[in-house]
Image (cartoon, grey):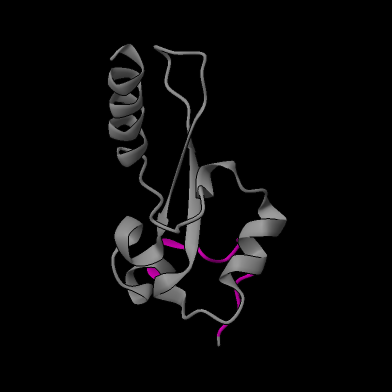
Amino acid sequence: MKTIGMLATLLVLASCVVDDGMPNFEKMTEAELAAYNQGRNIEQMIVCSEDTTTTSRVRRRRCATVLAMYGTAAQAEQLGVLSSGVGFSDN
């Protein structure tokens, strides 16, 4: 009886694991991000920013698409955020 309870608990916990197939961009290196962004349009490229606050010594890296982080590609170019990125091209 105890084995059945443990097996049921294990099955419930295993069903909670979710893999959406998306890589963890926060853990990727610049070279890996450049390879991931290769061939994508500018608005769908992944860009990361380091968030350093004075309240914490822990650096937090936030990664998102250009569209999600800055709006349209035209707005991002006006802000000048794409001029120094690795792996960006005008394709």
Image quadrant assignment for residue 3: top left
Name the residue located 48 percent from the left edge and 61 percent from the top edge.
46
Q: Position of residue 38 (x, y in %)?
A: 62, 75
- Side of 6 where 32 appears, left or right: right
Can residue 39 be seen here? The reply is yes
Q: Nearer the viewer, residue 27 or 34?
A: 27
User: 20 left or right of 31?
Assistant: left
Residue at the extreme front of the image, as rendered: 1
In this rendered view, identify the residue nearer to me: 71 or 62. Answer: 62
Q: Is residue 2 above or below residue 66?
A: above
Instruction: Depth check: give the residue in front, 60 or 14.
Output: 14
Q: Position of residue 18 (x, y in %)?
A: 35, 46
- The range drawn in magenta is 78-90
Residue 16 spot, x, y in % from top left: 30, 37
- Quadrant location, the N terminus: top left
Q: Position of residue 45 (x, y in %)?
A: 48, 68
Q: Is residue 87 left or right of residue 6?
A: right
Residue for point 38% across, 55% down:
20
Residue located 65% across and 64% down the image: 34
* Number of on-image labels: 0
Q: Specify the quadrant of the image occupied by residue 72.
A: bottom left
Which is the main secondary structure of the residues drawn in magenta? loop
